[in-house]
Every structure is written in structure tokens, then in C-alpha cells.
Amino acid sequence: MIKIENVSKSFANQKAVDNIFLEIKQGEIFGLVGPDGAGKTTLLRMVCGLIKPDSGTIQFSGGSPGRQEKGETFGYMPQKFSLYGDLTVMENIQFFGAMYQLDRATIRQRADEILTIANLIRFKDRFADHLSGGMKQKLALTCALISRPEILVLDEPTFGVDPESRKEFWLILYRLNKEGMTILVSTPYMDEAELCTKIGFIDRGKVVALDTPGNLKRGFAYHILEVKVAARDPHLFDGLDEVLDASFFGDKYHVVVKNGTAAPEVLSRFLLQKEINILSLKSVSASMEDVFVSLAEKEVV
């Protein structure tokens, strides 16, 4: 549905997007994941026709977002809330619906449908400035959906939103996708990356990994140990040769090791020497966080 071929873009001699090839198929929830400054927003803005690539092409199965006949098949939600705070929820929707040349009756009908799904119907007369962060994002999504697009492009739509609102937002996306909508979304959250059907990891303007979440985790090159001990030192495993990386979460350590067979004994002996009581030590599957930390470190090296 969207084919991105050999696309590059630079700003003041700084390459934001570097020779990217991607294909987003109909019915996918395609996630773009990567650190800040990786080029995600620049790529999405080129997909939306807001800026032109320096080289390469972006093709849609039925045309391009910049062509008038595609106006009712393409929806875009930018990274920052960009609606009008001194207008009500319904007034914002009416404004954007009018830009798509929809009549008032159609706008009202579609708005009521989408606002009901988003649990915003009770707030249709509230000023946008008086909405919570999560509600503002739902309003922005409603405005992007008013034309009933076939393709929905979202740039970090839940950034800075509370976990419950993020969950509700993704339930809406899943419902839209189940109804046939193709979704291209960028996200800084690894739990959201897990929800995509396919992921492209971008770092310094390049795609460094492209696959399903499951395949990316299965292809992780190292082993993970979950260690619970009677200690709370985030630097506990620093300097231990067998440990590639260690993070402390709540009451347990997440330890990345080279050798999953030998490492448990090495860690047990290490903790015993330090007279630290081991509550549990077990192997666990790699998370999406582990995968992307590993990919980012490879790019830095």
C-alpha cells in the first residue's frame, strides 16, 4: 500500500533520513521505532507529503497523499497537539471536516460514531484547552479519522500520555485496524512496539532491523537472566566479564549475558562471595527493550 524506495532527506548538511527502503502492506499496523533524532518524524512527514525527499520515491497503491483524489483516504496525526484550544471538541471536528469538504450532517454522524468509540461523546462541548492529555490525543485522532481514511499515519500519538489513556488509545487503533484500516505509527514505547504487526527500527536515519516483534525477539543474540536478590544496588554487576548489560527494575535485575549455560553459576558464585542472598535466578525471554538496546549499541559502535 505504501512503498518507500531509496528515500533520503538532509537538513543543513545533516542527514535525517538515509536511503530508506520500506513497504507497508494493506491491513498492517507498521511501527517505526528508534531513539530521539533517529529520523522517524522526518520520514512520516515525507510520507504525508508535508516535505519533499531529496532523493527516492514514496508511492501509494492508489496515488499519493498530495493528490486531491486521495484526500478522503489518508489521515495524519502529528506528534504535537495542533488543534484549537479555544474551540470545543465538536467545533474542532467541524473545522477539520469542512477542510475535507464534508457536509455538516456527515460530520455530525461520523463525529458521534468516533467520539463514542473514544469515550469522548460526553465532552463534545468542552473546550480543547480544558481536556486532559489523553483526551486531547483522542480528539486529534478523531479529527484525523473524520474523512474515514484507508491509511492512518500517527507520529508518537501517545507520547507523554498516562498509561491508562495509552491503553485506551491502542484499543481504538486495534478496532480500526480490525475494520480494515492500515496504520503507520511511530512510538518511543517498547510495549507499544509489541502491539505492531511489523516493526522497522530506525537509528541515525537508517533502517537497521525490519521484522515482526516475535521474530526480532527470537533473533536476539544473547541470553537474559532475571535475578532477585536482597540488594538494591543498580551497579551490582558492573565489571563482571560475563555480563554485557544489567538493569534494575523494582525488585529484580535484568541481566544480559553471553553464555546462558555458564552464567547462572558465575553469577551465583559472584553473589555468594559478596554475601548477598539470592531469592531467585532464572532465564527469561528477551523483551523488545533488550532487542532495541542491542541494536542501538551496535550502531554506536
Image (cartoon, rainbow, N blue to C red):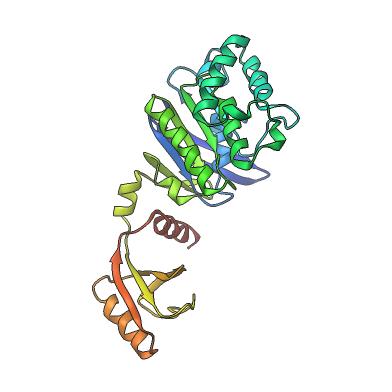
Picture mark count:
0
The relative height of residue 237 versus residue 84 in the rendered view (above or below) is below
* Residue 158: quadrant of the picture: top right
Judge whether residue 57 can be spotted in this image: no
Of residues 196 and 112, the one nearer the viewer is 112
* Residue 220: quadrant of the picture: bottom left
Is 8 displayed left or right of 194 in the figure? Answer: right
x, y percent for residue 281? 30, 73
Q: Residue visible at 49% across and 75% down?
A: 234
Of residues 5 and 229, the one nearer the viewer is 229
Q: Residue visible at 35% across and 44% down?
A: 211
x, y percent for residue 29? 41, 35
Most extreme residue toward the front, as rendered?
Answer: 122
Is 137 displayed left or right of 278 in the figure? Answer: right
Of residues 32 and 288, the one nearer the viewer is 288
Q: Residue visible at 61% across and 15% down?
A: 100
Is 248 displayed left or right of 260 in the figure? Answer: right
The relative height of residue 10 versus residue 125 in the rendered view (above or below) is below
Is 228 displayed left or right of 77 in the figure? Answer: left
Most extreme residue toward the right, as rendered?
Answer: 86
Judge whether residue 130 can be spotted in this image: yes
x, y percent for residue 270? 35, 85
